[in-house]
Amino acid sequence: MAFSDKLIDILNYGAVNLAIGIGYNLKLFDVLDDQAAPVSVEALAELSSLDPRYLKEWLAIMVTAGIIYPSPENPEAYLLPKDHGDLLCRRAGSNNLGVYCQEIPLLTACAMEQVKNGFKTGDGVPFSAYPDFQAFMTELADAKHEQVLVREFLPSVDNGTLVRDLGEGIRVCDLGCGQGTAVHLMARAFPNSRFVGLDNHGQAIASARQKARDLSLTNAKFRQLDATTLSRDASLAQGFDWVCAFDAIHDQSHPLKALKGVKHILKPSGCFSMIDIKAGSAIRDNMDHPMAPFLYTVSLMHCMPVGLNDQGRGLGMMWGQQQAMALLAEAGFSRVSVEQIPNDAFNLHFLCRL
């Protein structure tokens, strides 16, 4: 392919990504997916309660991109093929790729100017600059937890030993718990165990506490706490049988301090599950990664600048397996196994013991 052709593809696909993100957010794919026959612009407007002129322009993008098809019988009526809906609609579950088309537009709106300034100054971008994106990521993570956490991920940990222990009753800490969805799900599934969610975002902790009250969960507690301060908290020393961190470590400004904090709160016989991105640490290691440009862009626009705050390390999302293993060893985890996660092509499970 000539480079000029490649650039034209980039321009086209970048534009289509934006349009898919808009359509996904407005649930247009879901509306079309529910229809048994092709629909006109006017019918789609009525079904979606959206403006027909905007819909006509959006459909033009989808049709010329080969995502939505005009009906062979009526070129003014449109159909979303079922196999496209299998990847674009909310019903797609863990196969849903449409949801990710919202990321780049959101990050552009949140942080473009601050990221460009960071190129000149080396400064990070504060967490507070990303309210819409944080809400999106919370929604995405929550949906994933609800689909697979209790049913698929937990049974895969330590060959099923963890599920047995959770049933009998252990103490668990979710580091970087956000609004607490993982804690809520585990607390409901394993009433004999005790769960603590930690996060440095006050609003997220407040939401997590309220949801726990709404669900009448007496075995779930939440604390607003910075992961880098864990080692200084004597009340948490050797307090947990299992600690988990779902895609939380690479965003830390000081990840080594956070990992040493995990070691501090973990019982000598306990284990730590670090779930983080599946990648290599060097660019050359990711040349064949099918989504490397996308993931590096998300990292440039969010993960790296957030990690640069407070004179931080700025690991970025694509810090990779080799760097992760080195940092875990430096933190004191001498036994680490790297495991695949069922139905998750994006992440690896670093199962760590002291």
Image (spheres, helix red, strand yellow):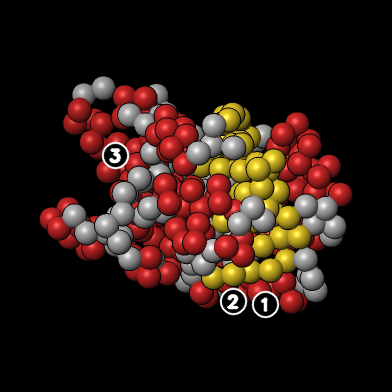
Q: Could you tell me residue 324's position as x and y percent?
A: 44, 36
At a point 51% along the width and 74% down the height, the residue shown is 202
List x then y, in percent, for residue 286: 37, 28
The answer to whether residue 3 is left or right of residue 9 is: left
Q: Which label's residue is closer to the chain start, 2 or 3?
A: 3
Query: In the image, what residue type sits under mark 2?
Result: Ala
Residue 45 rendering spot, x and y as whole percentages = 54, 67
Residue beneath disc 3: 10
284 over 98 or under it: above or below: above
Q: Position of residue 146 (x, y in %)?
A: 70, 54
View extreme (left): residue: 120
Compute the Cα span from label 1 to label 2: 6 Å
Residue of label 2: 206
The residue lying toward the viewer, choosing from 89 and 170, is 170
Query: Mark 2 and mark 3: span between their CA atoms?
Result: 42 Å
In the rendered structure, are the residues bearing label 1 and label 2 in contact, judged by CB atoms less than 8 Å apart? yes
Asked if labels 3 and 2 touch by Cβ distance under 8 angstroms, the answer is no
Residue at 54% across, 63% down: 233
